[in-house]
Image (spheres, rainbow, N blue to C red):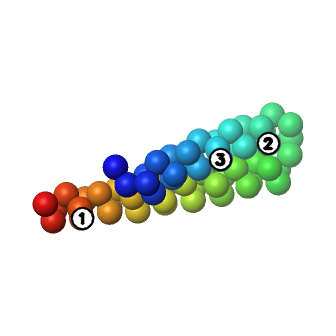
């Protein structure tokens, strides 16, 4: 498993928590930051998955 997948998943979870905290407190800035982090984590996870696929194809 590529490290980008692990880091991406962690970043996505962190973003989800931050987004929920923003919703709970009514802080739209924190909520938006959480959505951004969650999206960035999903992208990073996807990149890691692509790297895994290429690595597996070359074996």
Tell which residue pokes out farthest to the left in this image: 59
Question: What's the CA distance linking mark 3 and mark 2?
Answer: 10 Å
Residue 31 position in % (x across, y down): 76, 48
Label 1 or label 2, whichever lies nearer to me, is 1
Describe the element under mark 1 as helix, strand or loop: helix
Residue 46 appears anywhere in the view? no
Q: Along the horizontal axis of the image, is 7 left or right of 33?
A: left
Is residue 22 shown above or below 52? above
Question: What's the CA distance linking mark 3 and mark 1?
Answer: 28 Å
Number of residues whose C-alpha sits closer than 10 Å to that of mark 1, classed few (under 14), some (14–19) or many (20 or more): few
Q: Along the horizontal axis of the image, is 32 left or right of 25?
A: left
In the picture, which quadrant includes the C terminus?
bottom left
**Label for residue 36?**
none
Tell which residue pokes out farthest to the right in this image: 26
Describe the element under mark 3 as helix, strand or loop: helix
Number of residues whose C-alpha sits closer than 10 Å to that of mark 2, classed few (under 14), some (14–19) or many (20 or more): some
**Label for residue 22?**
2
* Residue that carries the numbered disc 3 in the rendered image: 15
Observer-nearest residue: 30 or 2?
2
Name the residue rendered at 23%, 62% in the picture.
55
* Residue that carries the numbered disc 1 in the rendered image: 54
Name the residue rendered at 86%, 37% in the picture.
25
Observer-nearest residue: 20 or 14?
14
């Amino acid at each position: 498993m590529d490290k980008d997948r692990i880091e991406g998943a962690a970043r996505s979870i962190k973003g989800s928590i931050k987004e929920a905290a923003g919703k709970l407190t009514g802080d739209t800035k924190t909520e938006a930051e959480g959505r951004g982090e969650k999206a960035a984590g999903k992208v990073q996870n996807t990149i890691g998955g692509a790297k895994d696929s290429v690595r597996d194809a070359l074996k």
